[in-house]
Amino acid sequence: MSEFGSEDVPRTRETEVAPVTEPVAEPPGAAPAEQPAPVPKTRTGAAFNALILGAIILILLLVFILENTESVKISYFGAGFHLSLGVALLLAAIGGALVTGIVGAARILQLRRHARRVRTRHRA
């Protein structure tokens, strides 16, 4: 005999025998393994995620304000006062967000009014 195990055919990867693995037997009466159903997305879950994101943003804003404590002079419609740079920028951002929110709310009201008119026309 040769070193390959047979004199006629040398062993190659194609002729090697794979080890036999036996399937794992499930205990009697056990249900077949199923993947768990995905957890449904709810408004409460979305609100929780929004709260976490809001807390992270507030922490970042707090760090920004604490790092920008240099006092600056603010003039607005003739009124002048001193305020820290971080607080002044935060107030400017809040003002911009309020203006954006007011314009957005006006547009939503306009679209609702239009949709109500279209619905009443179709009923008549």
Image (cartoon, grey):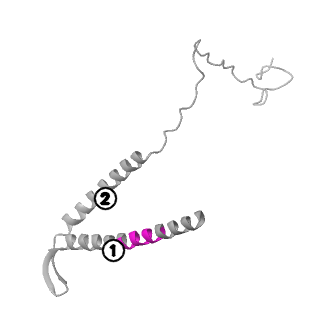
Quadrant of the rendered image containing residue 85? bottom left
Image quadrant holding the C terminus, namely: bottom right
Q: Which one is in front, 105 or 62?
A: 105
Mark 1 vs mark 2, foreground winner is: 1
Q: Residue sitting at 26 percent across and 62 percent down?
A: 61
Give the numbered dot on residue 57. 2
Amino acid type, callout 2? Ile
Q: Residues within 10 Å of mark 2 (few under 14, many from 20)?
A: few
Q: Which residue ends up furthest to the top in the rendered image?
A: 28
Amino acid type, callout 1? Val
Residue 7 at x, y percent in the picture: 84, 21
Q: Residue sitting at 82 percent across and 20 percent down?
A: 6
Describe residue 8's horizontal placement relative to residue 113 as left or right: right
Give the residues in magenta: 102-111
Is residue 103 a member of the stretch shown in magenta? yes
Alpha carbons under labels 1 and 2: distance apart: 20 Å
Q: Which residue is mark 1?
A: 99
